[in-house]
Amino acid sequence: MNKKIQNIINKKNKTKIVSLTAYSKNIAKILDKHCDIVLVGDSLANVLYGLKNTHKINLENMIQHTVSVRKGIKNSLLVVDMPKGSYGNLKSAKKNAKLLMRKTNCDAVKIESNNKNFKIIRSLVKYNIPVMGHIGFTPQYKKKFKIEGDSKKKANKLLIEAKNIEKAGAFSIVLECVYPKASKLITSNLKIPTIGIGSSNNCDGQILVTDDMLGISGFYPKFVKKYLSLDRIIEKAIKKYTREVKLEKFPSKKNFLNGSRHR
Ligand code: KIV
């Protein structure tokens, strides 16, 4: 097994795994100093493109953003979401995952579970493509948001799904909006680490959409902690710029002819 992947697995029961999303180089460069995992999530559909779900994002979109993110990443494990429709059968999954890896030099792909696609995970792993699973609320398959695993029976069903993903060879699993007791059950019964989003601190690590935690996405479900209101900080700078342009304070002499924006 690849060393970077093994390092992530080795963190289980030792230290929490820190993960965030990135869609471009500048943010990726900052995350790379702190995060174990950086995910190019298909959440970029909502966050960047203003789409109502993740379904219209295609492989080419994911490749373009990952090429940019890769430029900012030296240390973190770079994981990329396989978009909806890109891994519907063994043949397309293999072809598209290989293309994604080759064009972006990412470290692993993430595949949402529909509780059926274990063979696809197994075949990708067999072809040396590391796979991160994703259970609970899986936006590519589920239309309506709900908390998952909120009864003993449902929690056990999720555990079986997680175990099947582990058995298929995935190196970790995202638990999205999974009830805390179910997260605990799954995390304590798997050898691979669980990465939670909206799934309590019972997981081996956490992930958030960076734009949400920075306060710039405009979408803040209860499980998001806003660490900053970046929208207000940006607006303050834009207002200052606007004022200075109108008052002819910008550009001043020191801003004249001192190089091109295009490097
Ligand atoms: O697309 C994404 O950003 C994700 C995270 C929410 C885990 O899948």
Image (cartoon, helix red, strand yellow):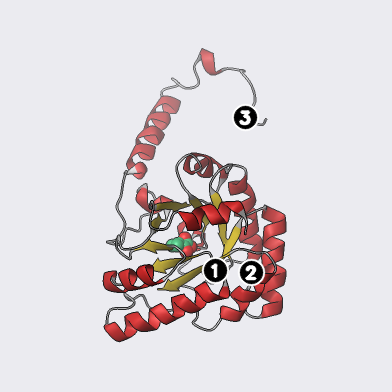
Circle number at residue 196: none
**Do the numbered discs 3 and 1 sit on residues whose CB atoms are within 8 Å?**
no
> Can you see residue 50?
no
Type of amino acid under label 1: Ala
Q: Secondary structure at mark 1?
A: loop
Q: For residue 107, which quarter of the picture?
A: bottom right
Q: Which residue is mark 3?
A: 261
Q: Earlier in the sequence, mark 3 or mark 1?
A: 1
Where 235 falls versus 177 (above or below)? above
Where 263 falls versus 54 (above or below)? above
- Between 110 and 48, the residue placed more toward the observer is 110
Q: Position of residue 126 (x, y in %)?
A: 67, 71
Where 219 falls versus 96 (above or below)? above
| Beta carbon at label 2 within 8 Å of ligand 1 | no
In the shown orientation, is residue 104 left or right of residue 212? right
Q: Which residue is mark 1?
A: 170
Q: Residue furthest top?
A: 253
Q: Earlier in the sequence, mark 2 or mark 3?
A: 2
Q: CA distance from mark 3 to mark 1?
A: 44 Å
Q: Secondary structure at mark 3?
A: loop
Q: Residue at x 69, y 75 (%)?
A: 92
Q: Which residue is mark 2?
A: 125
